[in-house]
Each structure stands twice: as C-alpha cells, then as structure tokens.
Image (tube, rainbow, N blue to C red):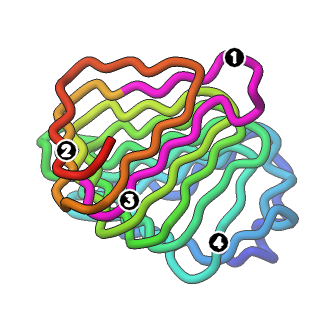
Amino acid sequence: LSGAELQNIYTSRLFVGNEKGGSIYVDGITSANSQNILDKVILQSLKEDERVIFEGDKSFFRALDVVSDKGIDVNTDVETTVSSLSLQADFDAFKAGQIIMADGVTITSKTDLDIESRLKTLGDSNFASDFSVAFNNDLETAGDFNVYADRDGNGTGDITFAQNIVFSDSGNSLLLKSNDLVLGVEINNAASV
C-alpha cells in the first residue's frame, strides 16, 4: 500500500494486516497521505515471528495503534498529529516480542503515547506527547533518554514507568519533563539523572 494509495482511502478506522500476513514496512507516510483516516490506523502483524518496521523517511498518522507478534523496529521518526500512539510488540504474550528503537529516533504523539511492550533503544532516543507518556513494560536503553510529556503545558501530562528500567550506558543523560512522574519500579541508571 503506497502513500498515494492510502491517500485515496476515506474511512474512520483502517486495519492493515492480520494473523495470516507477513511483516509490515512503513516508509515516509506524509500527513496528506493519512489525513483521510479520521480516527486511526491500526497496523497488525500478528502471524508468528512477524514484525512491523518503520524505516526510511518519517511517517505521520492522525492516530496510530501498532500490534505485532514478534516485534516493532522503529528506525525512523513516527508522529501522530491528532490523537494517540500505541506500540504493542508482543501480541501473543509469550514475551518474545520487543520494540527496538534506532539511535536518534523520536516518537511523538499529539495525545497519549503508550509503549506497551519491552523497549530496547540502541542509542539516543526521544519520546514526546502533549498528554502522557507511559512505559508499561521492561525498558533497556543506551544513549541519552529524553521524555517530554505535557508539551502543551496544560498540566495533564504524566510520565509513567511501570516495569523494570535499566539505563545501561554511563555518561549519558536521562531527561524527564512532565506534569508528574509516576514510578512503579526502581530506576537503575549508570548515567546522570
């Protein structure tokens, strides 16, 4: 499905993929390409050992849910312009799927940003939302780790860490900006906080 083809689809919700399809590759979806999906795009790579891979140029969606069996590779920036963004990389709950984020990548959500699966960053990483940012599973990061919630300053954006957190590289920074910080676990950080 090309960006130009996507632009010709007018619907409230668009489901791409299922339990029989292979991996899904996303590259350079523009705001114009995805503007006619009024509610959200749902990317589903549910077949055993398949992934969703963001690569090439930055992609934009009004709202986005990504669900995968084996994992999600975020190798380029992803942004939602109207509503939420959710990443779930372990659909079958066998704990084999994880989100792998390349160095220098930014994930931005207009409203809530939910990272539902294990996350491993391979370098500097950035997360931004006008509302809340939630890390609901294990987190292992290398490089600078920057999280900006409540970007619009209206006092409703929190950052939540619900599971184990390991910041593995010393000499890197941890920057958290939000209305409130909710910690369900201990942070193990060799870097500066």
Q: Amino acid at mark 3?
A: Asp
Q: Amino acid at mark 1?
A: Gly
Q: State the residue at coordinates (37%, 64%).
A: 101
Which of the marked residues, 3 or 1, is nearer the chain's N terminus? Answer: 3
> Residue 12 in the image: x percent, y percent?
78, 39
- What residue is disc 2 on? 189
Foreground: disc 4 or disc 2:
2
15 shown above or below 32: above
- What residue is disc 4 on? 58
Looking at this view, is 41 or 11 the one in front? Answer: 41
Looking at this view, is 24 or 99 the one in front? Answer: 99
- What residue is disc 3 on? 144
Q: What span is colored magenta in the figure?
A: 141-160
> Residue 45 in the image: x percent, y percent?
39, 57
Q: State the residue at coordinates (14%, 51%).
A: 96
126 shown above or below 103: above
- What residue is disc 1 on? 155
Q: Amino acid at mark 2?
A: Asn
At mark 2, the secondary structure is strand
At mark 4, the secondary structure is loop
Which of the marked residues, 4 or 2, is nearer the chain's N terminus? Answer: 4
Reply yes or no: does residue 153 show up in magenta. yes
Which of the marked residues, 2 or 3, is nearer the chain's N terminus? Answer: 3
